[in-house]
Image: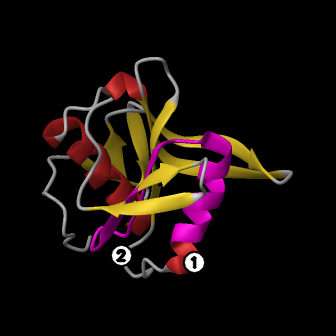
Amino acid sequence: MQKLNLPPIACKITEIEGKTFVFDILRKKNVRLTPEEWVRQHLVHLLINQFSFSKNLIKLEGGLQYESLEKRSDIVVYDREVKPYFLIECKAPEVAVSKKTVAQASRYNKVLKAPFMAVSNGLKTYCFEMNFETGDSLQMQGFPPLP
């Protein structure tokens, strides 16, 4: 897998019937290792190991409904009241982080209403603080603090 601009991770990679899997520490199972999953796993390890977010408050690939369409959020970190706190949209490294990808995450966040949001392809990560009253977002220098 491609080297990312995120801290390296210690993960278990397995070959099963010619396909590559990574052990997901949150879902506690092997998942297919795609470029997007590689980014997701790096971000999960970063959230837990560097920023001390609780494993119990992180959900991967959660379902949500946006304008009658079923969608999946990549990573949602919840606060202690189990309200969405930080939404992270993951893209494969070859997918540019653009206005289009930020708009996709913003659409998901209109449903979740997390005060913080990020979009990452593992090479570039952009974090935002959301203001739902004004509809504005402020780009941040890094990840939000623990809730």
Disc 1 designates what residue?
100
| Element type at mark 1 | helix
Q: Position of residue 15 (x, y in %)?
A: 33, 55
Quadrant for the C terminus in the image: top left
Q: Identity of the amino acid at label 1?
A: Lys
Question: In front: 32, or 15?
Answer: 32
The image shows residue 139, relative to residue 11, as above or below, that is below
In percent of the image, x 43 and y 82: which residue is there?
Answer: 96
Question: In front: 50, or 17?
Answer: 50
Which marked residue is nearer to the observer: mark 2 or mark 1?
1
- The magenta stretch spans which residues? 102-128
| Element type at mark 2 | loop
Q: Identity of the amino acid at label 2?
A: Pro
Q: Position of residue 24 (x, y in %)?
A: 35, 40
In percent of the image, x 83 and y 54: which residue is there?
Answer: 67
In percent of the image, x 13 and y 57: which residue is there?
Answer: 8
Q: Quadrant of residue 30?
A: top left
The image shows residue 84, relative to residue 97, as above or below, that is above
Question: In front: 15, or 37?
Answer: 37
For the residues labelled 2 and 1, the Cα–Cα distance comes to 15 Å
Q: Quadrant of residue 17?
A: bottom left
Task: Verify whether residue 119 appears in magenta.
Answer: yes
Q: Position of residue 124 (x, y in %)?
A: 29, 73
In percent of the image, x 86 and y 51: which residue is there?
Answer: 68
Disc 2 designates what residue?
93
